[in-house]
Image (spheres, rainbow, N blue to C red):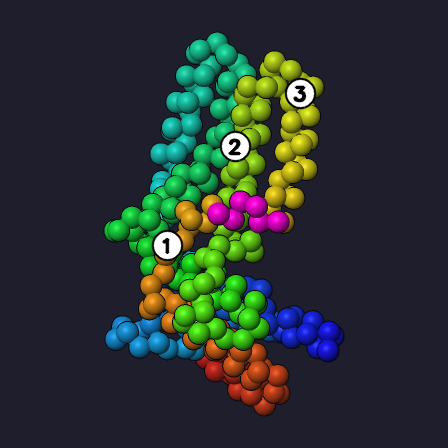
Amino acid sequence: IEKGDRNMKTKRSIERGYATNNGIVFYSQGFPIICSETYRGDLGKIKTRIIPSVVAMSLALSKDKTRINRNIIRIFDIVLIILCILSGRIHFAIGAIYFSITISYDMLIFIEFVYDIKSKRGNQRMAGKYHAAEHMAINAYEKLHRVPQLDEIKKFSRFSKNCGSNEILYNLIFYIIIGLLVSFVAPRNIILYIMLAGMTLILMPIIKSNGLLKFLQILTTNKPSDRELEVAIESIRNFEKMEEELKDTETWSNVFSSCFDLL
């Protein structure tokens, strides 16, 4: 029985997925080049389709509304570095250069991304709701080992330690810490700098693997309504159906044929 339970728990998991402005995409566990997309159509009806992962990725990239110009950011960086040099504090200049190379562009992109999610006029506001619904659906599915009901899914967290946005958040935090150490600690006490930098290198992977900062996903998610949660539940149902169909050779062949008609 215990072995069966472990197998069931292994089966009832979703490794990869992401939210769009009108739905949720889940990748197949056995055939990761295949995805199940569940979304609300223009008339509000929930629809689903099986698509190749390359199509899913192109759809995600086509929704990227980033507008920040790299040249504007570089001008800002140059001005910052010049001010630091003129101040006579060389270590500040070193820190500013480090900040420029490793942090500034990604940070500004992230700030704009968060604004797009949180602002009432943001392009990614609905994606933020579907992102939260996606997490709640996965958390419920992995806990209950079945497709959740609407009243059940509402009880689960909208945060996930396996969320892809964690990588961005943890990298930003890591580089900010190292940037501050380079600017303010290294010029005064190199031994202390090495110790603190070493502690950062050791602790950040531990914090990341345990999802200790997953609450920061409050920046990348919005509280979902029943409409988004209904799509999330249907997404789980369609994911299960896709996985079952892909076990059958004939169905598997038909799915592949229909998928690559989209390419």
Q: CA distance from mark 1 to mark 3?
A: 40 Å
Residue situated in front as seen by the camera: 50 or 165: 165
Picture coordinates of residue 46, whole percent (x, y) = 35, 76
Residue 47 falls inside the magenta stretch: no
Inspect the image, locate mark 3, and give the three-letter code of the amino acid beneath it. Answer: Leu
Identify the residue at image location x=33%, y=49%. Answer: 118
Q: Is residue 69 above or below residue 233?
A: above
Q: Is residue 183 above or below residue 178?
A: above
- Closer-to-camera residue (196/83): 196
Out of 70 and 222, give the one closest to the viewer: 222
Q: Residue furthest bottom?
A: 250
The residue at which mark 2 appears reads as 176
Closer to the eye: label 1 or 2:
1
| Image x and y of residue 138, in percent | 51, 65
Circle 2 sits in a helix, a strand or a loop, which is it?
A: helix
Disc number lying in front (1 or 3)? 1
Instruction: Please state the horizontal and vertical placement of residue 212, each as a whole percent of the image.
Output: 57, 46
Please say if the residues under marks 1 and 3 sit with CB atoms less than 8 Å apart. no
- Which of disc 2 and disc 3 is earlier in sequence? 2
Q: Which residue is mark 1?
A: 222
Please give the range of residues in magenta.
210-215
Dot 2 amino acid type: Ile
Q: Which residue is mark 3?
A: 192
- Image x and y of residue 109, in percent: 41, 42
